[in-house]
Image: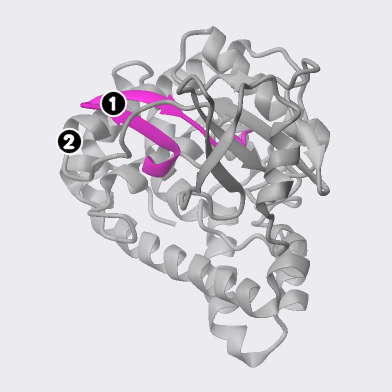
Amino acid sequence: MTELRAPDLTDVLSRYAIDTPRVTEKLSSGIVNDNWLVTDSGGGRYILRAYRRVRDPERVLFQLRFQDYLREQGYPTAEVIGTADGEPFLTFAGMPWALFLVVEGQEFDFTRLPQAAEAGRRLAEFHEITVGYDGPVAHVTAGEVDFSALDAPPSSHTWSNSVLGEKHAEHLGRLFPGPEYAGDLGFFSDWRRRAAATWPNDRSAALPRAWLHCDYHGRNMLFRDDEMVGLFDFDFVTPGPRVFDVARGFFNFGREKRGSRVIRDDFCRAFLNGYETRTPLTDEERGSLGFMAVLNWCPDAAFYEGRLPEEGAERIAERLRFDVIMMRALDAEIRRLAPEFGWAVV
């Protein structure tokens, strides 16, 4: 992975109409993308982002226009700062770059139940508002579950174009052919067969759809007290069943702390209740939440393959192991919580 130097950042910032911009620090919040804090002579504060994960200019344009739309509708997110030429982003060193005005706040506090409820309510608002988005659209190519199969004619017991399909399982087998991967791939294969049989295309396609954030967690948002004041990182926005987001949310805001795989009943319930104060879920959606929570962590062969040149085989193998560890943990937690919450078990 190429490390950018101070002169590179100066060249990028020279494209913006900012008086004496200065990079003060590289932020640790970016895992794949790079983010720097920038100040100007008047005390203005900005985030400069280099898009390592998503480099397709059309996709970046979509993400920034989508973010602009949210802000125009009164949803809390960062203002996108255009270049001096009026463009929403620029390209430098083979990557798109964008600049955002800083939103002041703190990350999600795992001890505050009202913040979990607020996160649920704001997710419902996100789903409601984005129904009206009619700007440019460019779908993500890899990195999240592919819901395109749900738009095709129903097929029996398979999402042929998704992570639940046989072709995806074969793709994973080619990427990870060694015996050391047999246990992880075996667990995934067993689960996906049960999931595809329980949630075939026709059943899954009937679930209410929305624009999904797909990465809705406490480090992608900021709070002031118990109010969410900013949602960020739209790299994986895609259309799909809205419960996919809800399921990821009840795990991310229900767990005990970052890195934990234990879901607290009260925080999980607070998040779900917060969502339903704005948008009630159907009985079928509630029943699907356990399935969707595990689906969130399914191995993604296209994503692994796309990241392989930059990250290397060892790092990609770690990603596979981690994803399956999360699948196993979520599957166990769903079985524990299913009787209380009324979730179906795959």
Q: Which labelled disc corresponds to residue 118?
A: 1
Total labels: the figure holds: 2
Question: Which percent across, then down, holds residue 84?
Answer: 75, 18
Under circle 2, the secondary element is: helix
Determine the image quadrant of residue 299. bottom right
Q: Is residue 261 left or right of residue 234?
A: left
Asked if residue 284 lies in the magenta stretch, the reply is no
Which residue is nearer to you in this view: 335 or 117?
A: 117
The residue under the point 63% across, 48% down is 145
Residue position marked by numbered label 2 in the rendering: 113
Instruction: Say if 177 sits above or below 192 in the image.
Output: below
Instruction: Say if 57 sits above or below 50 in the image.
Output: above
Which residue is nearer to you in this view: 209 or 36?
A: 36
What crowding class fits label 2: few (fewer than 14 Cα within 10 Å), some (14-19), or many (20 or more)?
Answer: some
User: Disc 2 marks which amino acid?
Assistant: Leu
Question: Which percent across, then down, holds residue 277?
Answer: 29, 18
The span picked out in magenta is 218-237
Colour treatment of the image: one colour
Q: Quadrant of the C terminus?
A: bottom left
User: Disc 1 marks which amino acid?
Assistant: Glu
Asked if residue 236 lies in the magenta stretch, the reply is yes
- Regarding residue 149, the answer to whether it shows in the image is yes
What crowding class fits label 1: few (fewer than 14 Cα within 10 Å), some (14-19), or many (20 or more)?
Answer: many
